[in-house]
Image: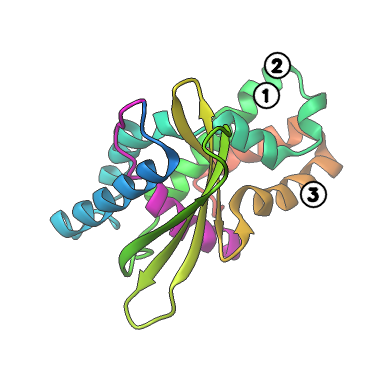
Amino acid sequence: MANIAALARVALLLAFVLPAYAQEAGPQEVVTKMTQDVLAAIKTDRHLAGDRQKARKLAEEKVLPHIDFDEATRIAVGRAWAQASPAQRTKLVHEFRAMLVRVYTSAGDAYQGDALKVLPVRGRPQDDDATVRTQFIRAGGQPLAIEFHVRKTGNSWKIYDIAVEGVSLVLVYRAEFDAVMKSQGIDGLIRRLAEKNASALPV
């Protein structure tokens, strides 16, 4: 699924440099600070994007606590999530998380831009769900529209989906997951994800 990998690499390279934020930080502040850290990290270490070991370490330390993998997996799995047992859900989240981290650490040269412009947030201040709209400014190219879908979990905001040019990352995966589950069921999807993660097959 080359198109899925390309979409994921652009989006996750931006999302997976998320630092620790104050609990009161809102969704727009989270993304704005993230942008600053992405640019600073790239400028400080030009080999960061292509170094899988560095990228994984960065993700484990700075990013994973700020991604809502439970919600992202629920959306990606779709209606079958309701039929999954607690044990199956745990395995699905584990494997989906591992897959997204693997996509990020193989991002390579996905980052080729200069800045990320943060636009006004969609959502009311009192809402627990919001969309942070941004434009990825690319050298010599048209801005790339990227939306971060976030929700409030406790006192912090977490990302559960990213849309690039209107295409949702988790919904792109849902199409692939649906095809596997129709023929092999939920356990078949779990096995497929585990096999990909174990053998580093293309996502």
Quadrant where the N terminus is found in the figure: bottom right
Would residue 117 be found to the left or right of residue 2 on screen? left
Mark 3 to mark 2 CA distance (whole Å):
22 Å
Residue 14, magenta (yes or no): yes
Q: Which residue is mark 1?
A: 89
Q: Which residue is mark 3?
A: 179
Amino acid type, label 3:
Ala
Give the image location of residue 92, x and y in percent. Answer: 64, 30
Q: In the rendered image of this protein, does residue 25 appear above or below residue 53?
A: above
Of the pair 128 and 179, the residue shown nearer to us:
128
Amino acid type, label 1:
Arg
Instruction: Assess disc 1: are there few (<14), some (14-19) or many (≥20) residues with their C-alpha within 10 Å of its C-alpha.
Output: many
Q: Check if mark 1's residue and mark 2's residue have beta carbons within 8 Å.
A: yes
Q: Hey, which residue is sitting farthest front in the picture?
A: 125
Mark 3 to mark 1 CA distance (whole Å):
18 Å
Q: Disc 2 on helix, strand or loop?
A: helix
Of the pair 55 and 29, the residue shown nearer to us:
29
Give the image location of residue 77, x and y in percent. Answer: 72, 38
Q: Disc 3 on helix, strand or loop?
A: helix
Q: In the rendered image of this protein, does residue 60 appear above or below residue 124?
A: above
Q: Disc 1 on helix, strand or loop?
A: helix
Tag of residue 86:
2
Residue bounds of the magenta highlight: 1-23
